[in-house]
Amino acid sequence: MESEMRRDANAMEVYPISNRLSISWARGNTLRVSIFQQQQQQHHLAVADGGGGGGGKVVELKIGCSADDELLLGEGDITLSHSRRIAYASVSPFALLLSRRNSPIPLSSSPYHLHSDYVMEFSNDINALLHTSTSTPTPLIQHPKDILINNNNPTSLKAAWELLHMFYADNLSQPWLPERLVDWLADYDSLLSNTHPTVHAKLVNFQKHLVNLQVIEDDPEYWEVMSSALAVGWLDIVVKLLRLHGSYQLNELSNRETENGLVEAVAVLISKMPRLRQDLDGQKLGECYKAKPDFIQAWEKWRSQITKLDCSAYWVQCGHRQTRDGLRSLLQVMLGNTNSLSTSTCNWIELFIAHFLYIRPFTIGLENMYSLAQKCIQLKPASSQQKLLELIIGILAENNEVVLATCSKEFGPWMVVHAIELLTASSDEAEDLLHEEHHNLGGINMEELHRLIYAQVLSSHALTWQIAPIYLTACMKQGMGLLDILLYKQPFEHNQLLLKNLEICRLYELDTVSADIMKRAGVYHWKHGRKGCGVFWLQQARDEVRLNRIAQQLFDSVGKSISDESFKQWEGLIELLGSESKTAGGLEFLHKYRDFKKSLQQVQHGKTVDAAKQAVESLISLMKNSSTPQRFWLPLLHDSLKLLSWQEKPLLNVSQSNLLLNKLQELSMARLRPDFIEADLPPQALSSVRQALAINLGRAILEEQ
């Protein structure tokens, strides 16, 4: 960053940036950049601002959603961080389902029922992780005019998954499918409000000015809202609104007794409405019936009570016209009057639900539902498209291509990959469609194609690439090849990322890829100066070729200057490389030389004669060993001058002295060759060593005599 940007009301001015910069994460996806200005900059800004400028400015950079993140879950109402949590959380259910599908089936179990159970559990797990509850504490004293209390934050993704779960995974609840749609609309009708008029939008608007109404029953919107809520089965809201009627006030009971009786009668009938469903939530009204004969009997009795009330003479005695008309309109809704239902609902899906509740409660089969949906669409055509409604039409029409296309276009590749598991489990036609191989796609099927697309999206983000292998390994034809490419493309700078890469290779038994990655990491670290780290990874990869090259380079570097300083520079690598290198002479010499230097250091620090004798033994061992290169002979002897000139007594005997003199003679002859490498020693080094050896030989001869 080369300049600091300050945004004013009318213009943007640019000033040189200070070298004092602080970057930290703030709340949410906000990066806080604090810039502390220098003294001259503060003075300049103070003049520009009209005086008084001082300290640092804090700039907040809000990080938005990138194109890759939109591809993950589509352009929707889910935050970036939540989308990544969903991607990670869905890995375990997906992997478990694939593992169970590929495992042998017990002979005592039915393959169909067992697989259905697995898909049902998978769908429930996905449904649970999509839950985005933002519950707030329920107040101890609730305002009587709060008619909408929604502690959840519905998302289109969860709404779409619940539709797929309802129609494809949950086979046990198929007899109660209409009631399941009633519950679905109650939870997600607010999502349709952005593109369609809805009952939920009506209630929200009415809620805003409900507090200011003095006589609520005089407001036509009051009765209109109740008719709409009743048409879509929101019985608890309707009863709650009825209890706000002015006839319930204590000072009105005596004057409006008949009116209040009619209101209460309608409220009781609504709360006693028969429901053909498995169970009822504690907050929902109605009487639950699981068996169809019991429901029919209760339904006929309930409808007869409504008809009897509608023909009652008490309506004549009701003096409040709005109440009388409003209550009778509610009765017409419950009696299934098509005109009343069409007037009360706002779009075709609400009219569709109203038909289930009050006209065709026994509707079963997708064909019958689709026929009814088409009629409702004709009565209430949509002015614009809505992705959830498109998905419902595709499901009811049993058009798997439309369902997949809608999921892919509107909800992203995550939705498609996981929804395929539900579609193939419930429909042979969908399974044939998704498993048919296409030659224009390289011989893969649609299921594998969608998995590859999703894995590609995951791989493109630094925070999600780790879970892409789960989906790549589920692609039998091209997955493993793309997994190799993904692993090779990961950077080697950070050891944690490298270890994660190697762990993925271990899980999927990619030994060759693992070895290549470790080789590349070793070469990378070696080239960037981290030589110890480079040697370590090359050793882990068992790359003998490169290790031998490094050993040769180390051998040559030490040979140029065998001083204490140069040896300290390479001692760590010598220890790390070990003595297993197959270089000419190997590194065995360097390890022996290390031991010799340690003994020589003890002698130089004033240790005993035993330390000097040990150093002489190391020297003789090095000079006798064929692995010691000839160019190291003179440096070794020059470092040992103190041993050769030991004052108390000669440390080398006659044979040892002759051995070293012969080595000097060979060295003198070798120096005549043009390829001989001279050591970095003083010019008189050879004569000094020869003189010391001659003196030591003479003293040794005299001592032996």
Image (spheres, rainbow, N blue to C red):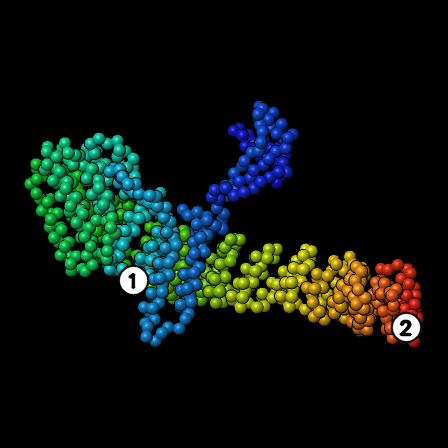
Foreground disc of the pair 2, 1:
2
Nearer-N-terminus badge (2/1): 1
Quarter that holds the C terminus: bottom right
Query: Which of the two residues, 674 or 625, is positioned nearer the viewer here?
Result: 625
State the count of labels: 2
Q: Quadrant of residue 702?
A: bottom right
Residue 697 shows which numbered tag?
none
Q: Nearer the viewer, residue 317 or 397?
A: 317
263, above or below 695, in the image: above
Give the residue type that dot 2 points to.
Glu
Residue topped by disc 1: 171
Determine contact: label 2, label 1, CB under 8 Å. Answer: no
Residue 331 visible here? no
Name the residue at the top extreme: 50
Nearest to the observer: residue 128 or residue 575 = 575
The secondary element bearing badge 1 is classed as helix
Badge 1: residue crowd in 10 Å (few <14, some 14–19, many ≥20): some
Residue under pointer 2: 703
Q: Position of residue 356 (x, y in %)?
A: 22, 52
Using residue 261 as the reference point, say whether residue 219 is left or right of it.
Answer: right
SS category of the residue bearing label 2? helix
Does residue 33 appear left or right of residue 450 in this picture? right
Q: Amino acid type of disc 1?
A: Asn
Question: What percent of the width, then of the height, locates residue 74?
Answer: 43, 50
Q: Left or right of 266: which side holds 135?
A: right
Please rate how many residues cluster around mark 2, counting C-alpha atoms within 10 Å: few if below 14, some from 14 to 19, many from 20: few
Q: What residue is shown at x 14% (from left), y 31% (from top)?
A: 251
Q: Position of residue 410 (x, y in %)?
A: 40, 51
